[in-house]
């Protein structure tokens, strides 16, 4: 299957929260890999993940607005609604 990503992804395993913009409810997740344009998140179940949300990193509380592109049983692929700057991308990558 061809890779259709617009930007290369970097592997990272970093704790984060999926925060619903409507009610502020949070779901724990792990950022599996990321790029300047999106990320793959590991979740217990994709059923409770809203179509758009803020991804909040546990380490530094950085917040990234996201929208869901695809879902599997325990993974969610997201696109950042605003392309991450090089500085914020380094924050996401844990550098």
Image (cartoon, rainbow, N blue to C red):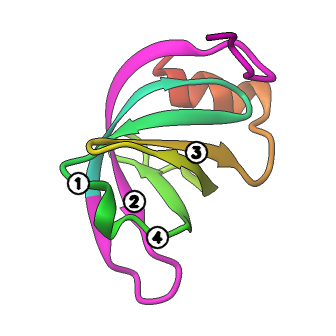
Residue under pointer 4: 50
Q: Secondary structure at mark 4?
A: loop
Please tell me in which quadrant of the rendered image residue 42 appears: top left
Q: Give the secondary structure at mark 2.
A: strand
Q: Residues within 10 Å of mark 4 (few under 14, many from 20)?
A: some
Q: Residue at x 32, y 56 (%)?
A: 46
At x 68%, y 13%, the residue is 3
Give whichever of discs 4 and 3 has the lower sequence position. 4
- Residue holding disc 3: 78
- Circle nearer the N terminus (2, 1): 2
- Where disc 1 sits, the SS reads loop
Span of residues in magenta: 1-27
Q: Nearer the viewer, residue 93 or 3?
A: 3
Disc number for residue 18: 2
**Disc 4 versus disc 2: nearer the observer:** 4
Q: Quadrant of residue 78?
A: top right
Assess whether mark 1 and mark 4 are in contact (beta carbons under 8 angstroms).
Answer: no
Residue 45 numbered tag:
1
Circles 4 and 2 in contact, beta carbons < 8 Å: yes
Residue 65 x, y percent position in the rendering: 64, 59
Crowdedness near tag 2: few (<14), some (14–19) or many (≥20) residues, C-alpha within 10 Å: many
Q: Nearer the viewer, residue 57 or 37?
A: 37
- Across and down, in percent, residue 75 comes to 35, 39
Give the alpha-carbon distance from disc 4 to disc 3, as whole Å: 11 Å
Q: Are marks 4 and 3 in contact (CB under 8 Å)?
A: no
Q: Is residue 12 magenta?
A: yes
| Mark positioned earlier in the residue sequence (4 or 1) | 1
Circle 1 or circle 3, nearest the eye: 1
Give the CA distance from mark 1 to mark 3: 15 Å
């Amino acid at each position: 299957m061809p890779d259709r990503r617009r930007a290369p992804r970097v592997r990272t395993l970093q704790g984060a929260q999926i925060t619903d913009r409507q009610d502020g409810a949070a779901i724990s997740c792990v950022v599996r890999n990321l790029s300047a344009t999106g990320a793959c998140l590991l979740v217990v179940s994709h059923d409770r993940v809203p179509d758009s949300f803020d991804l909040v990193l546990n380490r530094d509380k950085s917040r990234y607005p996201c929208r869901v592109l695809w879902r599997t049983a325990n993974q969610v692929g997201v696109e950042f609604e605003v392309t991450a700057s090089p500085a914020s991308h380094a924050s996401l990558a844990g550098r």
